[in-house]
Amino acid sequence: MRNRPMLLILLVLGWWTVNGLVWTGQVLNMRDATGQWLDAMQVLRLELSSALLWVPITLALFWCVDRYPIERGRALRAVALQGAAVVMAIFVRALAVMVLNGWVGWYAHLPSFQSVLATSVLNNLLMAWMIVGVAHALVYAERAQHRERQAIELESRLAQARLEALSAQLNPHFLFNALNSIAEMVHRDAEAADRMLVDLGALLRHSLGASDHQEVALRDELVALDHYLGIEKMRLGERLRVHWGIDSGSLDARVPHLVLQPLVENAIHHAVAVRTTPGEVSVRAERAQDRLILEVRDDGGPQRTSRGSGIGLRNTRARLSCLYGADHLLEIVALVTGGTLVRLDLPYRPAGATP
């Protein structure tokens, strides 16, 4: 309530105005039922005046409840203060009747203040406590919303911290593997090792350039993956064959930074590096309406289909869970023809859209 005072004032004013109109209609209906003659404008003035007197009193009671709500540890104090506020509200209404009666005309002959006060107690005690109850409902609802917002914000911060930790874990992992590949090559083919360093430099620029973003455009991710594959091709030579199947409609999709590299690295490590004959790794991307399908396939033997516990895949699963919750799928499928297929099913979100 304290965050939107003007809205509260308008709502209270509107509520009591509607009540005044409703009471006017009820009195006029009773007039028709009993056959009594009453001036409609006079009835409207009486009922609207009586209703609108509740506006400042309602706001004051709301303020009192907002400041001193009934809650554990302070219940007796709050009840006492609100009881005093209710008594004050009854007194103020009686005093207002005494002051405004000459203009409004509640009484043809104004009685004593004691009589007006007694009538005010009978007419307004229950209403005042009902307002206190409504004010408590609003306070508790506002607090519940505030706690919910805090919980969501905390969850978001925790997820972001976890993503940053996972990214910090992933970058040294792939960098170590790339440097290890270059170290294997430098004594056998210095020129090839030099080209591998060029690819590694480009890969590092991509990694560092996107370090502040958890997601990048798929086209940028594929450029980085091509540099990584350049390193592996130098190391494995003709044993590594790469097939691309990229739907142009998927290039602008947002994907997790370095999501494909550990999947391709896993396929190369298990399906190609352990063989003396050529092996193929294929990378496919396709947009299917509001979904993005990414696939990494190799033609290795079926004995490797139980893989999936390495740091790259564990990291990928954890990052996908943080970014998309339950709205994603990562599955590892053993192919009948031999080899393994890793499929990612992600929500399609264009790179320029707000997360």
Image (spheres, rainbow, N blue to C red):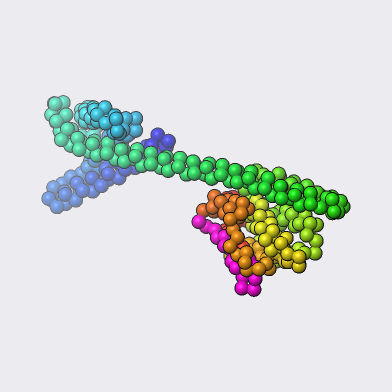
Q: Quadrant of the N terminus?
A: top left
Front residue (pair 345, 306): 306
Measured as percent of width and height from the top left, residue 328 is found at 54, 58
- Is 329 within the magenta? yes
- Is 313 within the magenta? no
Q: Quadrant of residue 273?
A: bottom right
The answer to whether residue 13 is above or below residue 300 is above
Q: Report the residue at 16% width, 49% height from top.
A: 30
- Residues drawn in magenta: 326-341
Q: Would you say 144 lies left or right of 88 here?
A: right
Q: Report the residue at 19% width, 51% height from top.
A: 29
Q: Quadrant of residue 96?
A: top left
Q: How many marks?
A: 0
Q: Is residue 246 visible?
A: no
Q: Is residue 326 visible?
A: yes
Which residue, as the protein is rendered here, is positioned at the far bottom? 337
Q: Report the residue at 20% width, 35% height from top.
A: 124
Q: Quadrant of residue 121?
A: top left
Q: Report the residue at 13% width, 47% height from top.
A: 36
Front residue (pair 56, 37): 56
